[in-house]
Image: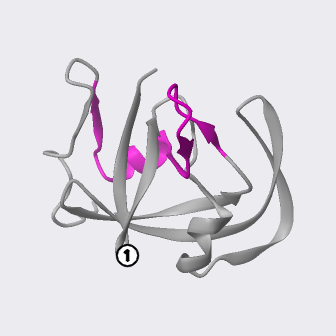
Amino acid sequence: MGRIFTNIRIGKRDRWTLFDSGAENTYVVKGVARGLKPRRLSKTWPARLGGRVHAIRQTCILDATVKGKQLETLAFVIDEIGCDPDGRPIVILFGKWSMKQWNVVLDMKREALDLSWSPKQFVEF
């Protein structure tokens, strides 16, 4: 499992993000989701994250710029994610399915993201 913390740009604001290969899904806190036009789900789903169970009632499309690349992915809206080791609040958790979709690689030696494999187009077979 790998974890990288970095800012990503949502609109005109930088947002503190955890890229976590141990998390299946992508999550955003309500404050971030407000600007992303959240959509109410027809059913509430439980999600265990950070040692507690969260009630997932909304999703949104996370439209972000990461290291100069534009990425869009589905995100679940939750009340809080937690803090980084320095106590800084995390407002986005970018999970492995979104990383796979956009070929985001966690470079653990450099503690950085590698987006060199990120697609410039979608190729379907």
Q: Is residue 67 above or below residue 89?
A: below
- Which element is circle 1 on? loop
Q: Nearer the viewer, residue 82 or 88?
A: 88
Q: Nearer the viewer, residue 41 or 5?
A: 5
**Left or right: where 59 falls relative to 94:** right
Residue projecting furthest to the front: 87
The image shows residue 16 at horizontal and vertical percentages of 44, 49
What type is the residue that disc 1 sits on?
Gly
Q: Is residue 97 magenta?
A: yes
Q: How many marks?
A: 1
Q: Are there few (<14), some (14-19), or many (20+) residues within 10 Å of tag 1?
A: few
Which quadrant is home to the C terminus?
bottom left
Question: Which residue is labeled 1 in the image?
Answer: 11
Identify which residue is drawn at 20% across, 46% down. Answer: 115
**Left or right: where 3 falls relative to 40:** left
The image shows residue 107 at horizontal and vertical percentages of 24, 27
The image shows residue 104 at horizontal and vertical percentages of 29, 43
Identify which residue is drawn at 21% across, 53% down. Answer: 67
**Which residues lie in the magenta part?**
81-107
